[in-house]
Image: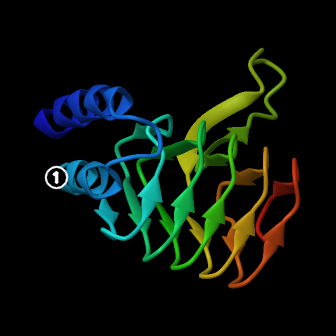
Amino acid sequence: MIIQIARFVIMIIFTLIPNSRLFVFKNFLLNLVGHQISLSARINSSVKIYGHGILKIGHDTWVGPNVSIYLNDTYVEIGDNCDIAPSVNIVTGTHKINNDINIFRIAGDGYSEPIKIGSGSWVCFGALILHGSVVPARTIVKPYEVVRRC
């Protein structure tokens, strides 16, 4: 519970920092609450991180404005020398499909699967990386592409 409160407070402070400044300080704040961020990574202040999981970001990686990362209860690992363009969504969660016709809601129990983005990769504007995906090293994910278990 204390970690969740600390993460909430850190994200409020995070949004008050200029978008493309004080990268080492922002990484330090994220590391304080259990994430594993290289001090040479550059994360924009408008990045949103949701959930209880762990975010791992390697050396010299850029995470652009308005990126949303949904950790849920697992992890997202982004390698070294990656470029994550603006407005990318990285989503670890999904639902089982409920085929019981006596239940009106088709979205069943939720679950999460980790996501890995290999070193040197470039995830272009607006891409969606879904649960369980592994993006190989030095891969280009095209604008608005949906990646599902690459």
Q: Residue at x 57, y 38 (%)?
A: 110
Image x and y of residue 21, in percent:
39, 46
Q: Is residue 141 left or right of residue 71?
A: right
- Image quarter where the N terminus lies is top left
Q: Is residue 85 left or right of residue 41?
A: right
Q: Residue at x 68, y 85 (%)?
A: 137
Q: Residue 48 versus residue 99: which sits nearer the camera?
A: 48
Image x and y of residue 128, in percent:
76, 48
| Residue underneath mark 1 | 32
Q: Residue 90 versus residue 39: which sits nearer the camera?
A: 39
* Figure check: 20 above or below 141: above
Q: Is residue 74 left or right of residue 107?
A: left
Structural crowding at the residue carrying mark 1, measured as other residues with C-alpha within 10 Å and reported as few (<14), some (14–19) or many (≥20): some
Name the amino acid, label 1.
Leu
Q: Is residue 23 left or right of residue 139?
A: left
Image x and y of residue 100, in percent:
79, 29
* Figure check: 36 above or below 130: below
Residue lying farthest to the left in this orientation: 2
Q: Residue at x 79, y 44 (%)?
A: 126
Q: Secondary structure at mark 1?
A: helix
- Image quarter where the C terminus lies is bottom right
Image x and y of residue 32, in percent:
16, 52
Q: Residue at x 73, y 84 (%)?
A: 138
Q: Residue 50 versus residue 46: which sits nearer the camera?
A: 46
Q: Residue 47 versus residue 102: which sits nearer the camera?
A: 47
